[in-house]
Amino acid sequence: MAKKKAPASQRREESLSRDCIIEASIELLDSSGESGLTFRALSERLATGPGAIYWHVANKSDLLAAACDAVVARAMNQTVVTTPESTIRAVALGWFDVIEEHPWVGSALTSSPELSPIVRILERIGQQIRNLGVSDEQQWASVGTLMAYILGVSRQNAANGEFARTRGLDRSDFLEAVSTAWSQLDPQQYPFARSVAPRIRDHNDRMDFLAGIDLILDGIKSSRGGDDV
Amino acid sequence: MAKKKAPASQRREESLSRDCIIEASIELLDSSGESGLTFRALSERLATGPGAIYWHVANKSDLLAAACDAVVARAMNQTVVTTPESTIRAVALGWFDVIEEHPWVGSALTSSPELSPIVRILERIGQQIRNLGVSDEQQWASVGTLMAYILGVSRQNAANGEFARTRGLDRSDFLEAVSTAWSQLDPQQYPFARSVAPRIRDHNDRMDFLAGIDLILDGIKSSRGGDDV
DNA sequence: ACCTGAACACCGTTCAAGT
DNA sequence: ACCTGAACACCGTTCAAGT
C-alpha cells in the first residue's frame, strides 16, 4: 500500500530519478525526434554527467522502451464504455492521436516485444473482440490482424513524419512530393500507383486509418458466422 | 535496348560499382543484421577504404534504401496469374518469405517512402484489387489497409527476429519467453493477454499472417456491395 | 574519374574516483 | 547509495592527396 516515499532530504531542484529521466527523454524525443535522444543531450538537460543516467537506466534501448511505455500507458488508461465496436474505433483513434503527438513511439514500440506497450494495446482490443462474440479460435486471428494493422500504420506515419522533418518539409509538401513522384511512374509498369496518385494529395490519414479499422471489423463480423478454416 | 556495358579494362577482381556495393551490403545485412552494415565492415569486405564507397553512394540511408529496393524488386518480379484473390495471397506469402530471409528489409522499408520498394508491393496488390471489381472509391482504402497490414507484420517480425538474435535466442526460445511473460500478467488487468498466452508458444507466423490477409479480403468483399461511408 | 586513408565530430558505455 | 567526467571503442562523413 505504502507508496515509495521520496528521500527526506530536499536538495536543490529534485534529485535524479528514473521517472524524471524518462520524462526528460520524452520531451527530448518530442522536440527533436528519434535522433534527438542522446545521453549527452539528456545529461545536459538534467544538469548532470552522462554516467549518472546509467545508475537509473540499464542502457539506451531500456530508456527508449521505458519512455515509450510511459506514453502508451497514459494513453491506454482512459476508458470508454459503449459498444465493443465503437470502443475499438475509439481506442484506435486515440492511438492514432498519440502517434501524431509522439511520432517516435511508432518506431520504438517494436523494440520491446516481451511485454509492456504492445500488450497494453492488445489487451484493450482483445477485450472488445471478446465482447463482440468472436469465437475463441477466431479471437487470436482477429486481434492479431487489428494489431498488425494498427502498428503498421503507426510505423508508417512515424517514418513519413521523420522523413519530412529531416528534410524540412511540412505534411502537404510531403504528400505533394509523393503524389507527383507516383504520377510520373511508367504507365505500363505502374498503372495502379499512377491512378491513385492524385488522391494522395488531399487524403486524410485519420479517416483512412479508421476506414481500415472498419474494413477489418467487417471481415471479422463476416467470418464470425460459419467458416472455421 | 543496349545494356550498360562494363568498362573494357579487366582489373583484378572487378572494380567498385554501385551494384557490387549494394550486393555486399545485402550479404552483410543478411549475415549480421541491421547493425552489421557499417562503412568500415563494408569497405573491408570490398578491400577498399571507407571513403571510396561515398563515390558511388550518397550516404548510409541511401545505401540501405538501395539494398532494400534491390531485394524487393527481385521478389516482386515473379508473376503469378490465377484469380485476383489467390494472387494477392501468393504475393503476400512471397513477401512473408522475403522478410524471413532478409529481416532487416522490414525496418528499412519505411525509410524511403517516396517511391521504390513500397510502390512495388502496392502496385501488385492494387492491380488485383482492381481485378476483384472493387469500386474506384473503395480501392484506396482496400489497398491501403492491406499494405499497412503487410508492412506491420513485416516490421514486427523483423523486430522480433532482431530481438531474439541480439540475445542469442532462437525462435522457440523467444515465443516461450513471451508466452510465460504474458501468462504471469495481472489477471484483473490483463485477462485477454493471459488467455491467449498459451497459444503463442506454438502458433505459426505464416499461417496467422495469411489468416489476416483473408480476414481483410473478407472485409473488402463484404463492403464491396452497398455502403459508401 | 575514381580511390586512399587520416581526420573530425559525435555516439553509447565504462569506470576509477569522488561525496 | 549516488554522482562526476574523463576515457574507450566505434560510428558516419569529409577531404586533401594520390592515380
Image (cartoon, coloured by chain):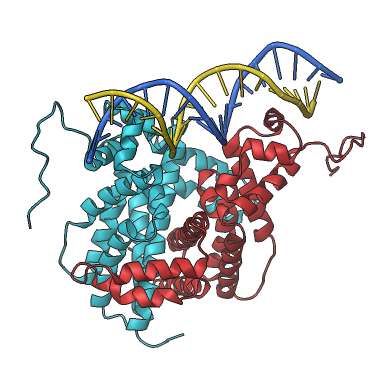
Chain colours: A red, B cyan, C blue, D yellow
- Judge from the rendering whether residue B174 lies leftward or rightward of residue B192; answer left or right: left
Please identify the quarter of the rendering in which residue B223 is found.
bottom left
In this rendering, the answer to whether B121 lies above or below A25 is below
Q: Foreground: A62 or B208?
A: A62
Image position of B166 with respect to A87: above or below: above
Q: Is residue A140 left or right of residue B220?
A: right
On the picture, is B21 further left or further right than B153? left
Residue shown at the point (32%, 45%) measured from the top left: B100
Whether residue A226 is visible to the viewer of this picture, yes or no, is no
Q: Quadrant of residue A37?
A: top right
Q: Position of residue A169 (x, y in %)?
A: 50, 62
- Residue B205: in sight, yes or no? yes
**Quadrant that contains the N terminus of chain B:** bottom left
Q: Name the spot of residue A48 as percent of width and height, x first.
A: 75, 33
Image x and y of residue B185, in percent: 62, 46
User: Horizontally, is A190 left or right of B164 in the view?
Assistant: left
The residue positioned 43% from the left and 63% from the top of the image is A138
- Percent of width and height locating residue B97: 28, 49
Q: Residue at x 92, y 35 (%)?
A: A8
Q: How many marks?
A: 0
Q: Nearer the viewer, residue B60 or B131?
A: B60
